[in-house]
Image (tube, rainbow, N blue to C red):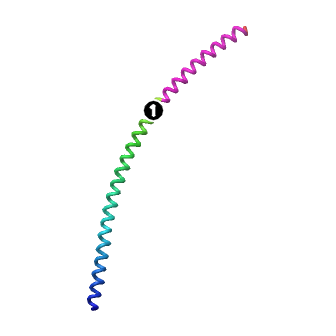
Amino acid sequence: MIAAIWTAIGLLAALSLGGLFYLGARIDALGASLGARIDSEGASLGVRIDSQGESLGIRIDSLATRMDAGFDRMDARLDAVNGRIDAHLRRHAG
């Protein structure tokens, strides 16, 4: 009877340890798989962010060029108005 109990205890311990080792191996494999997927997604996301950054940079540069052109036109108009005001003042001051 005692031998049967010890046999049952040994069998239960072996099954429990075997199950733990099996689950540990499965968890490690799953972790490696998930790690690889996360790295892949991170690289893909990095490429997308870089692409969007370049696109945004181009749009900002285009807008800056347009704004500079607008400021140049405004400066030219203000210079013309200043010239007219100066001529007007010279006519009436002299």
Is 6 positioned to the left or the right of 63 in the image? left
The residue singled out by tag 1 in the image is 59
The mark tally for this picture is 1
Q: Is residue 72 magenta?
A: yes
The answer to which quarter of the image holds residue 35 is bottom left
Above or below residue 35? Residue 6 is below
Neighbour tally class for label 1: few under 14, some 14-19, many 20 plus, Cα within 10 Å: few
Q: Position of residue 6 (x, y in %)?
A: 29, 87
Is 1 positioned to the left or the right of 87 in the image? left
Is 34 positioned to the left or the right of 90 in the image? left
- Give the dominant element type of the magenta stretch: helix, strand or loop: helix
Determine the residue located farthest toward the bottom in the rendered image: 1
Q: In the rendered structure, which segment of residues is drawn in magenta?
A: 63-92
Is 68 positioned to the left or the right of 41 in the image? right
Which residue is at 34% across, 53% downward? 37
Q: Residue 36 versus residue 86: which sits nearer the camera?
A: 36
Q: Residue 13 versus residue 67: which sits nearer the camera?
A: 13
Which residue is at 62% across, 16% downward? 81
Q: Position of residue 55 (x, y in %)?
A: 42, 36
Q: Quadrant of the C terminus?
A: top right
Q: Which kind of residue does numbered mark 1 sit on?
A: Arg
